[in-house]
Image: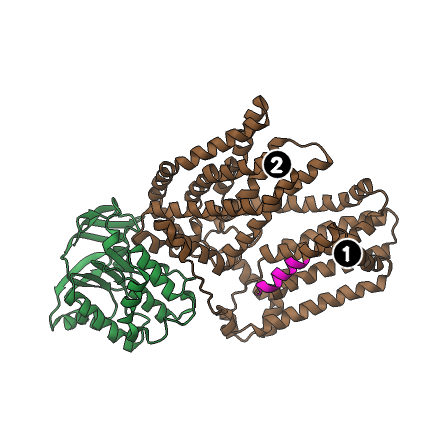
Chain colours: A green, B brown
Amino acid sequence: MIQATNLTKKYGDVTVLNIKNLHIKKGQSIGLVGNNGAGKTTFFNLLLDLIEPTTGEILNNNIKVDKSEDWKPFTSAFIDESFLIGYLTPEEYFYFIGELRGKSKTDIDDFLTQFTEIFNDEILNKKKYLRDLSKGNQKKAGIIAALIGEPELIILDEPFANLDPTTQIRLKKMLTSLTKNKNVTVLISSHDLGHVTEVCERIIVLDKGNLIKDLQTSPETLKELEAHFTV
Amino acid sequence: MFKKFISLEWKQFKRSANFNKGLAIKIFMGIGVFFLLMYAIGAGVFLYFGLEEFFPETKPWTLVNNFILFWFLLELTFRYLIQKMPVIHIKPLLILPIKRKSVVHYGLSKSLISIFNFIPLFILLPFSVVLMIKGQSPTNVIAWFVGVYCISLSLNFVTLLINKSDAIFYSIIGVLVCLIGLEYFEILKISTFAGKAFNFLSQNTYVSLLPIITLIASYYFGFKFMYKNLNLDNLDTKIKNVNTTDLSWLNRFGDVAPFLKNDLKLIWRNVRPKKTVLSAGIFLFYALYFILVKQSGGNLPVLMAFAMMFVTGGFAMTFGQFVPSWDSEYYQLLMSQNIRYKTYLDAKWYLMGFAVIVSFILATPYIYFGWRIYSLLIAGAFFNLGINSYLVLFGGVLNRMPLKLNEKAKAFGNTQGFKMSNMLIALPKIFLPMLLFGVPYAIWGFNSGIITIIAFGIVGILLKNYILKKIENTYQKTKYKMIAAYNQKN
């Protein structure tokens, strides 16, 4: 699904990301972990062609992301609040994304019923604009919107941050079922080692822009990661 | 305490992200403000002699008194549309041992430092001096000056109070239009009543106490209003119930429909675009000025062509110049969602097209001034559809300024969204219609000028796909720069 080759990103003299070779197979769920400044968000931004790579390239389903727009129909992401349109209500936002992905209003209404639990009566039919929702509820709306239209690649930056414990658990369940049932590649980053090891089958550790560990998740992975991050 | 606040402001100004970059612009704007104030002084002096010249039968002072009410209503309208209310970053101040009262007093005093309070001062002061030189009693003139200026300053605080409420604003506009109508058709000469009151003020010194009391009262209410709202509940956002309108009739426009729906919501639900569009409405009346001047003296059809272009181009000028900055808050979403750049630009083109057609319909009354004027209006509409719209979209590439949607723009002193390149891209918008009309007009006469503009407009509309493709290429090239610029929060 994803192939990054000789990928670097420099700001001035500072190299913020340097990945020689990374291959992600279709249907895998990948967890990206690393301390602040490790290059997680930079990698996501490069993958979404929001910043320009200094060298190298990323292929998304064999499409060079910075050369063609053809990866957009099957890719979706929620990085931060700049992916929300503040003056829309959550429903309008979902319909908008739906329209962009060829889903009718009724499609979206059907689609949203499965998230009643997660929404917890705080998002739909509240007559509020997205900008007036709490950070946590904004995040929920953004994550759900990223699932609209059966994308094959879903990118979520720190999906667990700002969420209440109940929602974190529900989100974990949702992400696991997503990768099990369908042919979906999920890419998430997180500071919570417990969560990523539960959800993802493969963990990639970045440090100062370098890929330093690439693990298949096993019962020992969490311990290994904790040991790695204990200084 | 005030001194500390001021030093905080100074640091905020000096350490802002675009301080250095903005310095040249600030100097440039400073010169602009200087000229504006010079004009104001000139206007104040000219006011007396001009009125004396054109209306020798009435005393200038009386004339000013008769019409000053209209000035106040107009001033209030402009203040509402453009004047930015003071923003103090009070969140960190709220939990510090600072008296709330002093924060509010500071905010209110800060609002006084605004060009809107200086322009009336710089007009009134020279006018009053001329009055005194011309032999009016100094005490009367001073009392009148104090009275009138106090009313103007009260409007400053009134603006603060009505700022949140559109209903009040629309009623003021309504009153203004009614008064002008009544005056014009001589049904009720409001100027006589108002004139009587202000003439009374100019003859009786003690009456100026009334405006002074008004000023104090408006300050008091402004204070109460801000004091009441000075807590976090009211600070962040007034959560209003949303009004969802069914816009599905737009679906017939296919691919661009979702964007059109969004843009209408953007305009309706955010402070800044809303005010921008409201002020675009003023352009509808722009050509009136030229027509009225023409009736009192000679005028060039070339200038008329320029003016009529503005009538239908107001929206493209005011709103359009910030495309795509209006979407800067969520530009990353648009860039990674399933959207073709082309479709996005297409949608913006349609939006401007709508605006041209709507303003064209609203401008129908211009037919009253005859066919020549109306044909210029038609030509202007074609120019805006077929040429100006592309210039505006192309200008968007150069204007990479993040905009905060729900914040009012400041007139002067705010560089958000202002760039030299804006000025440069504005030049062809202004001179092209004059050129396209002027050259054939000079050679073959009026009709050929009209036909030339319309022909160019039609060619522009027909070449839409080709031109948008070219514009899209420039957008693609600057994509990363745009995203990076929009990510910078001031």
Which residue is labeled 2 in the image?
B373
The answer to which image quadrant residue B170 occupies is: bottom right
Confirm whether circles 1 and 2 share one chain.
yes
Examine the structure image and report whether residue B370 is included in the region drawn in magenta: no
The chain that hosts pointer 2 is B
- Measured from the top left, where is residue A98 in percent x and y? 31, 59
Q: Is residue B399 left or right of residue A229?
A: right
Give the position of the C terminus of chain A as an image quadrant.
bottom left
Pointer 2 local density, CA inside 10 Å: few below 14, some 14–19, many at least 20: some
- Residue at x-position 32% and y-position 57%: A99
| B227 or A73, nearer to the observer | A73
In the rendered image of this protein, does residue B335 appear above or below residue B377? below
Q: What element carries label 2?
A: helix
**Extreme bottom residue here?**
A166
Q: Is residue B432 left or right of residue B253?
A: right
The chain that hosts pointer 1 is B
Which of disc 2 and disc 1 is earlier in sequence?
A: 1
In the rendered image of this protein, does residue A225 appear above or below residue B281? below
Indicate the amino acid at tag 1: Leu
- Measured from the top left, where is residue B101 in percent x and y? 61, 73
Magenta region: which residues? B165-175
Number of the label disc, if any, that sits on residue B188? 1
Residue A80 visible: no
Residue B308 visible: yes
| B193 or B63, nearer to the observer | B193
- Measured from the top left, where is residue B34 in percent x and y? 64, 45
- Residue at x-position 25% and y-position 53%: A73
